[in-house]
Image (tube, rainbow, N blue to C red):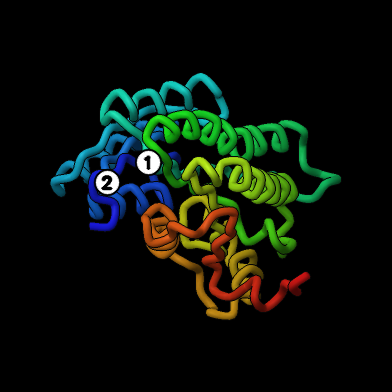
Amino acid sequence: MRLDGKVAFITGTASGIGRAAALLFAGEGARIVAADISETNHETVEIIRSKGGEGTAVRADVSVDAEVARAVRTAEAAYGRLDIAFNNAGVMLADDADAVSTSEETIDKTLAVNLKGVLHGCKYAVPAMRRSGGGSIINTASFVASMGAATPQIAYTASKGAVLSLTRELAVLHARENIRVNALSPGPLRTELLMSYLDTEKKRERRLVHVPMGRFGEADEVAAAALFLASDESSYVTGANLMVDGGITAAYVTPD
């Protein structure tokens, strides 16, 4: 198994990419600490245990420093170490639009979860991984961090661009400590988060017309990419941004 004996801390595990990753990682031998603000997070751990895996559910609002600190402490207390941190939790708010009309409240909440939440995860994962002799940190960004979004979502796009910059800097800072830090950039996915934002057929078609593969991705497809970054198979990969986007950035982004 690709993650045999490893301990993985994953945020946003109540649904979507986080749940898919938790189930996949557990199936590959990892012991999972599943963190989410939603009570349905316990269902994820119940599924893991029903399949013979090990998991612990933790309620955590990733925008709150102390709650992330507690969640990482839970991982070390339960399993004695931390090898993987997948900082995946995020929000995409319905009234996130352009710079003129997006409210300050929406901007603040989006940045608090999508950027500060990732930073909090890294802040507490790094010391834990030092104690474990190294590890892999994966931060969920987005294809919109590399290109503009067809449907305006300025706060979300800005937050994900910041995640990429944060990831690159941390990768350089901790490379000699055997701590790898990479970003994962999904394209448009058929998840509850995006479908609730693209809440009309017109909005969905407007997004899909730009995707060369002509379809929304699935959470399982992104989880499989996260598994590569979490495993020792990516041992020489750090500071990277792995695109899982159906070809959208290849079609529209010009290399520097």
Residue in front for this viewpoint, 154 or 68: 68
Dot in front, 2 or 1: 1
Residue in front for this viewpoint, 182 or 196: 182
Which SS class for mark 1? loop
Residue in front for this viewpoint, 146 or 28: 28
Q: Left or right of 153: which side holds 15?
A: left
The quarter of the picture where the N terminus appears is bottom left
What residue is shown with label 2?
30
Residue sitting at 43 percent across and 62 percent down?
225
The answer to whether 24 is drawn above or below residue 117 in the figure is below
**Disc 2, disc 1: CB below 8 Å?**
yes
The answer to whether 101 is drawn above or below residue 122 in the figure is below
Q: Mark 1 or mark 2, which is nearer the start of the sequence?
A: 2
Q: Give residue 111's quadrant in the image.
A: top right
Disc ID at residue 180: none
Give the percent coordinates (x, y) of residue 190.
Answer: 47, 62
| Mark 2 to mark 1 CA distance (whole Å) | 9 Å
The quarter of the picture where the C terminus appears is bottom right
Which SS class for mark 2? loop
Residue sitting at 59 percent across and 35 percent down?
119
What residue is shown with label 1?
83
Give the percent coordinates (x, y) of residue 243.
Answer: 56, 65
Q: Left or right of 119: which side holds 32?
A: left
Residue sitting at 15 percent across and 49 percent down?
51
Q: What residue type is labelled 2?
A: Ala
